[in-house]
Amino acid sequence: MAARIKPNPYVVADRSQAEGALAEMASLDRKLAGIETAMQENIDNAKAVASQEANPLLARRKELADALAVYAKLNRQELFAKAKSLDMGFGIIGFRVSTRISQLRGVTVEMTLEKLHQYGLSDGIRTKEEINKDAAMGWPDERLELVGLKRQLLDTFFIEIKKDAVPQEKI
């Protein structure tokens, strides 16, 4: 079995080294931000080029699909007398029967929810229950314990690199 070689960690021994480490981290953050900005510009340019190339093709495809739909609707009795779909070599066209639930005209979602509650049809109502920790934050510890919660204080270390604004040259 090969022995694992552990890297030597960088050790900060005094305040001067701590300031040096923060300065280097700030420099690295700027370099990383530059890399990310360049990457995002390349991605944006690639999306723009792809969109320019794709838009005419998508428009033509939609135009052809609309024309096929009109053809199928006008010739429905003849084309689909025996089956709901027709294999045409390069693809299949046809009609699918589907069912959906929609509101009656003049009836709002709120009115329907009220009726569902009124008639006890709770299986027709979606609910998602979850603990509201924001509300529980204001409760006393006794109430938290009553419902199986507790307040915890976390003391986490953080590093905040200052990002000084680059001065703009006056034109």
Image (cartoon, rainbow, N blue to C red):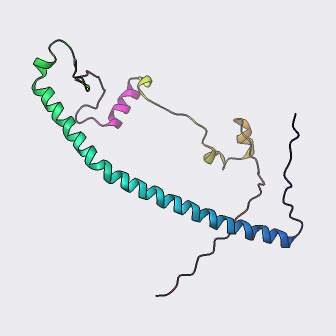
Drawn side of residue 6 relative to residue 38, left or right: right
**25, above or below 112, in the image:** below
Closer to the camera in the image, 90 or 25: 90
Drawn side of residue 92 relative to residue 144, left or right: left
**127, above or below 97, in the image:** below
What quarter of the picture does the N terminus occupy? Answer: top right
Residue furthest to the bottom: 171
Magenta: main secondary structure equals: loop
Looking at the rendering, the stretch of residues picked out in magenta corresponds to 96-120
Q: Residue 102's spot in the image, x, y percent? A: 29, 30
Q: Residue 29's spot in the image, x, y percent? A: 66, 64
- Is 49 part of what is drawn in magenta? no
Q: Residue 154's spot in the image, x, y percent? A: 76, 51
Q: How many numbered discs?
A: 0
Residue at 66 percent of width and 48 percent of height: 137
Residue at 42 percent of width and 58 percent of height: 45
Closer to the camera in the image, 116 or 161: 161
Residue at 19 percent of width and 37 percent of height: 64
Residue at 56 percent of width and 60 percent of height: 36
